[in-house]
Amino acid sequence: MINFNVPPYVEKALDYIEECAKNQKICGDGAYTKKCSEWIEERTGTAKCLLTTSCTHATELAALLSDIKPGDEVIMPAYTFVSTADAFVLRGAVPVFVDIRPDTMNIDEKLIEAAVTDRTRAIVPVHYAGVACEMDTIMDIAARHNLSVIEDAAQAILSTYKGRPLGTIGNFGCYSFHETKNYSMGEGGALLIRDEKDVDAAEIIREKGTNRSKYYRGQIDKYTWVNFGSSYLPSDMNAAYLYAQLEIADQINEARMALWNRYRENLTPLAEKGKIDLPTVPKECVHNAHMFYIKAKDIEERTALIQHLKQNGILSVFHYIPLHTAPAGQKFGRFHGEDRYTTRESERLARLPMYYGLKLEQVDEICEAVKKFYASESKTC
Ligand SMILES: *Cc1c(COP(=O)(O)O)cnc(C)c1O
């Protein structure tokens, strides 16, 4: 059987976790947390990276730092994971869902400005599959309407837009290190802070509203409760697991890219025959091979395809029931404009197995099964 996902594992992780345990340094903000944050800061050039317990929590932090208040509106795509909206709903804000582009499955930047009202406070672009949204357009709209930009870069670590790392373009960027992502610590994430001026406030909220981070650095002699806050810092053992992967991040990235390219090579003939659609990567974007998906004709064909693959021992999945059609989406948010592509395209999409450790021969096997499905399809038509 070929699994859909297997979490990344690097042998060194065990040594690093053992080191944490033996040294009895297992709480948050230890040596490995520091190593991971510094690695991300160096690689992305962001002013500050704070490791968090999840991308969901990083987004919650960004919502607090952006001073999102009840009744505020936040523009985001309808095709995304629930956390993108939850972080703002928790602040009493209204998610305003906008249609996506069928080529990248990202928010259609040309529809954003029409959704801006005098209550709009932020735009949340989601870089689906690690492929960037049209950030120049989005940053320009944000500047003209004085809006914050919070990038949901959960899937986009090491991806770039016009050479700029995703997660560093907006005011805040949120990464995920969930076990389904390119680099993982089980559950975890990171908040990237673009502007130095936001760093102090972020450190305080992340540390239960205290200035303990400054105290640890010796900048003050005792720490105290200075603002509201919560606990968003992960255990150093989780960071140790992640750091082992970051050390060989390029190797992991290259391995994933080889799988992604193999899928594309194998399936291009099927796409050329018009049987399926393949992902598009605009020329401004370098992606990170987070995901390989194909699009079937419609939901019936997709269901049959997933079933066919399963019968061949291959696990593939679909995802994101558009948020505006979910009970909570209807309760808390609204869709602006027309749903031309969100529902239709979401119903066509199937994600194929993709993980560090998957073999090129397995990709060939999966592609053969896909081709067989479409060969038998055309006979019955
Ligand atoms: C995975 C994911 C999240 C949530 O990440 P967690 O670390 O599990 O909180 C949010 N947004 C998107 C687009 C994701 O893919």
Image (cartoon, rainbow, N blue to C red):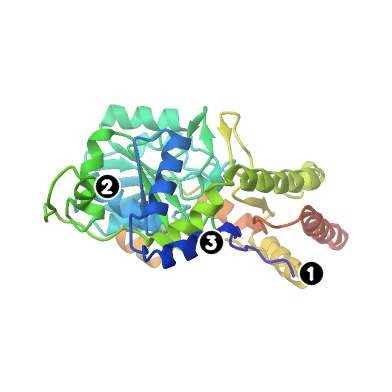
Q: Residues under labels 2 and 1: Cα distance?
A: 46 Å
* Amino acid on which disc 2 is placed: Glu
Q: Nearer the viewer, mark 3 or mark 1?
A: 3
Q: Nearer the viewer, mark 2 or mark 3?
A: 3
Q: Position of residue 127 (x, y in %)?
A: 49, 44
Q: Are marks 2 and 3 in contact (CB under 8 Å)?
A: no
- Decide: few, some or many residues near mark 3? Use Cα within 10 Å; few <14, some 14-19, many ≥20: few
Which of 128/289 is in front? 289
* Amino acid on which disc 3 is placed: Asp
Residue at 26 percent across and 41 percent down: it is 199
Q: Which residue is mark 3?
A: 15
- Decide: few, some or many residues near mark 1? Use Cα within 10 Å; few <14, some 14-19, many ≥20: some
Residue 73: give its label: 2
Q: Position of residue 75 (x, y in %)?
A: 35, 45
Q: Quadrant of ligand 1?
A: bottom left
* SS for dot 1: loop
Residue at 31 percent across and 63 percent down: it is 331
Instruction: Classify the position of the C terminus by image quarter.
Output: bottom right
Q: Looking at the image, is mark 2 or mark 3 earlier in the sequence?
A: 3
Q: Looking at the image, is mark 2 or mark 1 earlier in the sequence?
A: 2
Q: Position of residue 187 (x, y in %)?
A: 44, 62
Task: Left or right? Give the position of 312 relative to 294.
Answer: right
Task: Left or right? Give the position of 171 relative to 133.
Answer: left
Q: Is residue 72 visible?
A: no
Q: Position of residue 214 (x, y in %)?
A: 20, 46
Task: Left or right? Give the position of 368 relative to 295.
Answer: right
Which of 169/345 is in front? 169
Q: Which residue is mark 1?
A: 312
